[in-house]
């Protein structure tokens, strides 16, 4: 049985990974910064990880086999408003965790982002030079560098995912569903390209790579590139909503504060070669998302907080 320590367990990825893995031949201990999962079936604690000595104490107390670092300051506009805090959480903290994991012999998987690229060409490979545009992206890239500098054996995954969250608004997919369900119009960017992956598929892949001898940077995103508009239309069609409520617009007309990269499609060739199989199919992942909605999973996951 592998003991996983998951930071950011109240977030979209941390919580869904914990729920998918705990008790199924594995044990999960979750760490939340502000919102402990009071009714979760897995063990979880509330810790301020940026406080001096907390990381060392956490790892010594819980003695994990694998630490998956999901915790991050992920709100792009909030990072623009408070770059010092973004740097502390997204850049400095991962380096500290990486160093302690290296010292204690704990395998570390660090969750990064596709946004480290400027999106000018798309289909980025792991060896392509990053060029982050926003404070969020810059601090996440600095976090990658800090992790590898302190722990060369660590695995860094650049991701883009969607699913149901305890907060109810942590993913673009949730926002599309809420707006469409209410019969409200929503913007869909036609000039922002990404490779979304269902959170359940990502959780399964993380479990797979945790048991493999992989280190360095790997892209772990969906196999199909699409615009945010196309993503919204696919959700509408799958759920039976009116796709006409999604208005195709350019991101330049959105009024968003932080710069967005236009084409963040990533090559997953390196990962598929290591795994020996292709990435999960997008349409199948979307069906899982719909099936969870049909079975009341969004209400269940909200009840855990």
Image (cartoon, helix red, strand yellow):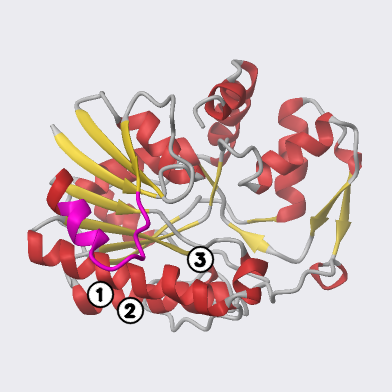
Badge 3 marks a residue whose secondary structure is: helix
Q: What is the spatial separation of the Cα atoms under label 2 and label 1, in whole angstroms?
A: 5 Å
* Lateral position of residue 122 relative to residue 59, left or right: right
Badge 1 marks a residue whose secondary structure is: helix
Vertically, is 259 above or below 265? Answer: below
Q: Which residues are magenta?
A: 47-59
Report if residue 172 lies within the magenta region: no
Q: What is the spatial separation of the Cα atoms under label 3 and label 1, in whole angstroms?
A: 17 Å
At 41% across and 49% down in the image, what residue appears? 8
Q: Say which of marks 3 and 1 sits in front.
A: 1
Q: Are marks 3 and 1 in contact (CB under 8 Å)?
A: no
Q: Which residue is tagged 3?
A: 114
Q: What is the spatial separation of the Cα atoms under label 2 and label 3, in whole angstroms?
A: 15 Å
Q: Name the quadrant containing residue 30.
A: top left
* Lateral position of residue 187 relative to residue 201, left or right: right
Q: Which residue is tagged 1?
A: 148
Dot 1 surroundings within 10 Å: few (below 14), some, or many (20 or more)? many
At 58% across and 35% down in the image, what residue appears? 164
Vertically, is 65 above or below 55? Answer: above
Q: Position of residue 244 (x, y in %)?
A: 91, 40
- Please tell me which of labels 2 and 3 falls first in the chain: 3
Label of residue 145 in the image: 2
Q: Are marks 2 and 1 in contact (CB under 8 Å)?
A: yes
Q: Position of residue 20 (x, y in %)?
A: 37, 30
Q: Name the quadrant containing residue 44.
A: top left
At 59% across and 28% down in the image, what residue appears? 287
Closer-to-camera residue (48/292):
48
Extreme-top residue of the structure: 295
Vertically, is 137 above or below 245? Answer: below
Quick check: can you spot residue 116?
no
């Amino acid at each position: 049985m592998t003991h996983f320590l998951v930071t950011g367990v109240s977030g979209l990825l941390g919580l869904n990974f914990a729920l998918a893995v705990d008790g199924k031949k594995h044990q999960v201990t979750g760490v939340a910064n502000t919102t402990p999962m009071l009714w979760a079936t897995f063990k979880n604690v509330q810790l301020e990880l940026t406080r001096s000595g907390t990381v060392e104490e956490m790892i010594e107390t819980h003695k994990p086999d694998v630490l998956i670092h999901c915790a991050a300051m992920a709100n792009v506009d909030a990072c623009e408003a408070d770059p010092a805090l973004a740097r502390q959480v997204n850049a400095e903290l991962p380096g500290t965790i990486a160093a302690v994991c290296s010292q204690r012999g704990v395998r570390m998987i660090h969750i990064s982002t596709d946004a480290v690229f400027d999106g000018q060409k798309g289909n980025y490979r792991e060896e392509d030079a990053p060029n982050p545009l926003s404070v969020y992206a810059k601090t996440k890239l600095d976090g990658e560098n800090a992790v590898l500098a302190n722990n060369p054996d660590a695995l860094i995954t650049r991701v883009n995912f969607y699913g149901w969250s305890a907060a109810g608004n942590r993913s673009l997919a949730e926002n599309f569903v809420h707006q469409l369900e209410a019969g409200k119009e929503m913007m869909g960017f036609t000039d922002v390209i990404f490779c979304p992956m269902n959170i359940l598929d990502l959780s399964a892949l993380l479990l797979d790579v945790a048991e493999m001898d992989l280190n360095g940077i790997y892209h772990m995103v969906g196999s199909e590139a699409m615009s945010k508009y196309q993503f919204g239309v696919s959700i509408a069609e799958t759920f039976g909503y009116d796709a006409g409520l999604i208005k195709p617009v350019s991101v330049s007309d959105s009024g968003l504060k932080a710069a967005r990269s236009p084409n963040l499609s990533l090559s997953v060739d390196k990962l598929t070669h290591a795994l020996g199989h292709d990435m999960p199919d997008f349409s199948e992942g979307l069906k899982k998302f719909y099936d969870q909605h049909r079975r009341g999973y969004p209400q269940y996951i909200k009840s855990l907080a």
